[in-house]
């Protein structure tokens, strides 16, 4: 089953600044962030195809296809970026074979460009109504429009990066408008971050063009 989502994402070199971690952990509404264990994702790179993301992660093979991208900007709070629409599909495999599968595909000098990325991700989840109002998401309760904010530390080729990502999933109509209002409502008062278009792209671009 495929899932549609709108996403904004920015990438930064180095470690997550303390003020950003404090903002994410203590100043965003809702309970404490959901903590994910440190994990290793194995990405398969299709050269010059920033509209495709393919990886092995958490017992799944995941494929994301970008449907469109368009500029995104807000004057208050001030930010700009590239809003991307993605369709995701996934295939699960038996957990008892996960290590063998990842080791086999991760061996060096195999044909095909691939990149291993270590991630330590924290996430906030919300529900959004038709007006763009953001509210807590009760545990284990589905949302008509699920809104997520994630803060992730990354290690690629032994170098630290971090990324701030915002995503909404659900069915149209008016998902773009609802997303813009929700971003404005939730990120008002964020730390002085350089949230601009030059830093805004999806994982496929980052994997191909970052050092």
Image (tube, grey):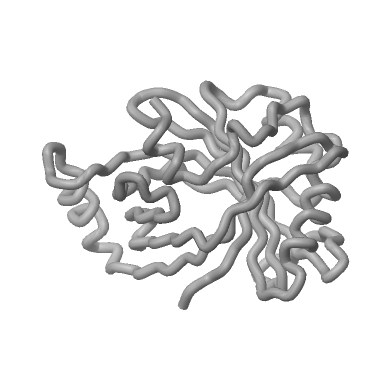
Quarter of the C terminus within the rendering: top left
Up the image or down, 120 lies above or below 66; here it is above
- In the drawing, does residue 44 fall left or right of residue 62? left
Q: Residue at x 67, y 23 (%)?
A: 18
Residue 170 against residue 22 in the figure, above or below: below
Residue nearer the viewer, 99 or 185: 185
- In the picture, measured across the screen, residue 47 lies left or right of residue 27, that is left
- Residue at the image position 63 percent from the left and 59 percent from the top: 6
Residue 151 in view: no
| Residue 82 on image: x %, y % | 62, 45
Q: Does residue 182 appear in the picture of this structure?
A: yes
- Residue 181: x and y in percent read 83, 55
Query: Is residue 76 left or right of 47 when viewed as pictured?
Result: right
Which percent across, then down, holds residue 92?
34, 69
Question: Which sits in the foreground, 45 or 153?
Answer: 45
Q: Residue at x 42, y 29 (%)?
A: 210
At x 49%, y 59%, the residue is 66
x%, y% of residue 17? 64, 23
Total residue callouts: 0
Can you tell which quarter of the image residue 155 is in? top left
Q: Quadrant of residue 174?
A: bottom right
Q: Nearer the viewer, residue 56 or 35?
A: 56
- Tell me: residue 186, above or below residue 208: below
């Amino acid at each position: 089953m495929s899932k549609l989502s709108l996403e904004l994402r920015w990438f930064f070199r180095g470690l997550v600044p303390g003020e950003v971690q404090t903002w994410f952990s203590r100043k965003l509404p809702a309970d404490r962030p959901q903590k994910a264990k440190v994990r290793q994702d194995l990405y398969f790179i299709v050269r010059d195809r920033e509209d495709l993301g393919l990886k092995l992660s958490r017992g799944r093979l995941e494929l994301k296809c970008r449907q469109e991208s368009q500029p995104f900007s807000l004057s208050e709070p001030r930010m700009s970026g590239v809003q991307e629409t993605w369709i995701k599909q996934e295939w699960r495999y038996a957990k008892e074979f996960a290590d063998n599968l990842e080791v086999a595909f991760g061996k060096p000098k195999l044909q095909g460009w691939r990149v291993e990325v270590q991630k330590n991700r924290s996430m906030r989840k919300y529900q959004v109504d038709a007006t763009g109002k953001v509210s807590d998401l009760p545990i284990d309760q589905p949302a008509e429009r699920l809104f997520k904010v994630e803060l992730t530390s990354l290690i690629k080729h032994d170098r630290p990066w971090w990324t701030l990502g915002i995503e909404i999933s659900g069915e149209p109509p008016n998902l773009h408008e609802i997303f813009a209002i929700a971003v404005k409502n939730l990120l008002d008062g964020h730390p002085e971050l350089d949230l601009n278009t030059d830093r805004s792209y999806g994982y496929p671009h980052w994997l191909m063009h970052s050092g």
